[in-house]
Image (tube, rainbow, N blue to C red):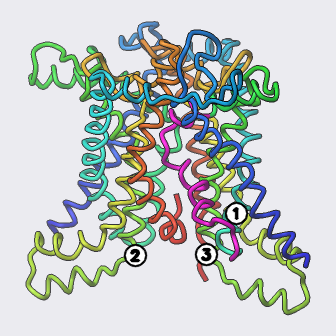
Amino acid sequence: MKSSLIKSTVIFLGLFFLYFPILVLIFYSFNENKRVMVWKGFSLRWYNELFNNEQIIEAFIISIKIAALSATFATILGVMIGYSLVRIRKIPFKSFYIFLSSTPLVLPELILGLSMLLFFISLNNVIGFPSSRGQLTIFISHVTFCIAFVAIIIQARLTDFNKNIEEAAMDLGYNYTKVLYKITLPIILPSIIAGWLLAFTISLDDLVVASFTTGPGANTLPIVVFSKVRLGLSPEVNALSAILMFALIIIGLFYFYFNKKFKH
Amino acid sequence: MKNKLFEKYFVFSPYFWLVLFFFIPLAIIFKISISVSEWGMPPYQDIFLFDNGFKINTTFENYVYIFSDYYYIGSFVNSLILALISTFFCLLIGFPLAFYIATSNIRLRNILLVLVVIPFWSSFLLRVYAWKIILQNNGILNVILLNLGITSEPLQLLYNQYAVIMGIVYTYLPLMILPLYGYLNKFDLNLIEASKDLGLNRIKTFFKVILPLSVPGIVAGSLLVFIPVVGEFIIPEMLGGSDRLYYGKILWEEFFVNRNWPGASALAFSGIIILVLPIVIFQILYSHWSQKNEI
């Protein structure tokens, strides 16, 4: 049929557009030649050099550390927001609460980064802390803009699920706290994990906000990669790309596994 | 009662964090943007002076400075145009994709949706970098064009505004598709059949039935692309040339190169003001939309 042919063509072209650049990147990562664009033969040379590049390895470890910590904090706070917005009626200045928890989703990172940096500098002038910027300030900034992403996932999940289960538990004598810890949290646990994975990836991937709030000893992976590819190409970054894309796509698949809605 | 204490704890912990680390920083941008600049560290004067009694020391000089110089306004306009064009192309590519995914059978639908969104999970920076490889003078696109005989010598594809649009459309496309899919997914396909039965042709069905029903999705997706693109810094930096200057680059240089903090803050705050309306619309949609869809 004509319309189903159009349909398959559109979907095929769309997917091709989305995956072609990634495949090109992976392809060139196996190029022996130091000049990235001139193909000289298949080789794992750049993978080898990558694993011996201390600067990249160190940046990778710093990034993982910051991402894991900020994802954890953002998840705790994001779950609280999601829960509050769906289950708690009385929130003082609720539209302000919504403003605070949704604007970071869209506000340009550049403005966010600048505001965080100026905030840390002002704070240092007033209370003498943080005396220099580094991993701690990146961590705080990442938590701040990851909260919104977790909150939206939790909110969607809580709106979805049957409140009767909670009410039944209350009728059976569970108190408020017990309902939360024994009923609500276990049910939304997959969404909490999904939120953590999303926050982890966003933090791991962030360049702009980290560039503003970084300091001595806190060169994250995107900062190092950006400095290498800003003006040209780097065969080591090609190898890194292939590995990182693979790893992140696996994380993405886990995200979808956990975030699927359980409809009754 | 214990519940109350508990609720307070849940509402106010994130409240406290976001006021301290999100709202106050925005307020500080505003404060510095109306401060008088001077040489020194920090490069601006306090807005409250106490030496000869109390005096408020503010100025709109920084805003005047920005809005009277074409260098700044021009870059603002460039960014807005860039965001408009990119949003348009994201919609142009994203809509048919979202529509056909939403009308596939349920098993295929989930697989396709995951396939469309997964690239979004791989690193943003590296996906932009991939285009740098593709668009090189001796890159894969030029090789194809040369072999097809479309051009006799390699085209300069990189370092211009078209490369920037390409990069943005590529990286932001999933943000357009998701909310579009969310709305298209919910509507009743029988409506299309019904409209065909009632004698409307394809084009009329699209404009009279499908399009009106997907307006909320179009608005949500467009805002998710438009607002961040206005401040986009990385993509113009990696793929763009000197043919066009954008807001993000100007802001970055005003702060890091010129070290004009009040000027950079005024730029940032003007950016927020320009984006207020889109952000407010986004928030209204967000409160409806977040309850039904997921990122």
The residue at the point 79 percent across, 90 percent down is A168
Of labels 3 and 1, the one closer to you: 3
* Percent coordinates x, y for residue B124 in the rendering: 49, 35
Which amino acid does the dot numbered 3 rest on? Thr
How would you rate the neighbour count of disc 2 (Cα within 10 Å): few for under 14, some for 14-19, many for 20 or more?
A: few
Residue at the top extreme, as displayed:
A34
Which amino acid does the dot numbered 1 rest on? Pro
Q: Which residue is mark 1?
A: A190
Height in image: B191 above or below B279?
below
Residue A114 on the magenta span = yes
Numbered-mark total: 3
Circle 3 SS class? helix
Q: Are marks 3 and 2 on the same chain?
A: no
Circle 1 SS class? helix
Q: Which residue is mark 3?
A: A159
Range of residues picked out in magenta: A89-115
The residue at the point 17 percent across, 75 percent down is B208
User: Residue A151, located in which quarter of the rendered image?
Assistant: bottom right
Height in image: A95 above or below B172?
below
* Percent coordinates x, y for residue B163 in the rendering: 28, 27
